[in-house]
Amino acid sequence: MNRNIILTTLFVISIQMICFSQFFIGAKAGYTSSWPDYGDIELPEDAQTDINGYNINVILNYSITNKISVGLEPGYVNRGAACLPGWSPRWAGDSKLFINYIELPLLLNYKWKLSNKLSLNTAAGYGVSYLVSAYRSIQNNIDEPAIVTQLNVSNILDSSTKRLDHGFYLGSGFSYDLGIGSIVSDIRYYQGVPNIERRNFMKNRSLSFSVGYMIKI
């Protein structure tokens, strides 16, 4: 008897999930600020470690219920670092590293309806990132232009940054329904897990602000 009740309950839940299931596709873009985690490394006084860049992502979202969905958001993101410890030689001016990734986060989303069209969304998940290009910028004097050099990311001697990164995503945002589509906006925090530097302690950390649009298919 108990077995029949359990099977019936699971069947009803499965039917409800299928009825609510919907696929969404879209795109978003925005601004990304990165400030790496240097651990216990002592930085110069008033050191500025943040790097500003941008992000572009495709939205692939599968709604399991009217509140819960699972999404993949493959994209391109700028991260980086300033005031890098351990650089040799130690430059007197500003030193910056710009590192560009293709990322693939897998997210679990939860939606709260605030009104008929407006919703508050939260997301949490994990993802991998692959380094596709890197640039080093060195400015020895504020009166002189910075010297920007592209690094060979596949050469350990030229670039000490590891190519593979992975970590946690956590964020929230809003969506506004417009017929078959929705305007979406979000704030997304990323915390890398591994040390991405071969010679020094450094973990990726960034905050992204994005706006986009997605439609139901």
Image (cartoon, grey):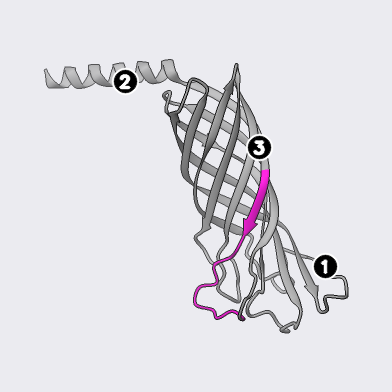
The quarter of the displayed image where residue 78 is located: bottom right
**Residue under circle 3?**
28
> Which residue occupies the foreground of this view, 192 or 28?
28
- The residue at the point 75 percent across, 82 percent down is 91
Instruction: Tell me which amino acid carries mark 2.
Output: Ile
Up/down of 58 relative to 181, above or below: below
Q: CA distance from mark 1 to mark 2?
A: 57 Å
The stretch in magenta equals: 30-44
Count of numbered circles in the view = 3
Magenta-drawn stretch contains 200: no
Q: CA distance from mark 1 to mark 3?
A: 29 Å
- Residue 178 in picture, x, y percent from top left: 61, 20
Q: Which mark is residue 148?
A: 1
For marks 1 and 2, the one nearer the N-term is 2
Instruction: Tell me which amino acid carries mark 3.
Output: Lys
> Which residue occupies the foreground of this view, 61 or 206?
206
| Residue neighbourhood size for the residue with mark 2, other residues' Cα within 10 Å, grouped as few (<14), some (14–19), many (≥20) | few
Quarter of the image where the N terminus is located: top left
For marks 1 and 3, the one nearer the N-term is 3
Q: Residue furthest right?
A: 144
- Residue 153 in picture, x, y percent from top left: 72, 63
**Residue under circle 2?**
13
| Residue neighbourhood size for the residue with mark 1, other residues' Cα within 10 Å, grouped as few (<14), some (14–19), many (≥20) | some
Up/down of 173 relative to 134, above or below: above
**Horizontally, is 201 left or right of 51 in the view?**
left
Instruction: Tell me which amino acid carries mark 1.
Output: Val
- Residue 176 in picture, x, y percent from top left: 57, 27
For marks 2 and 3, the one nearer the N-term is 2
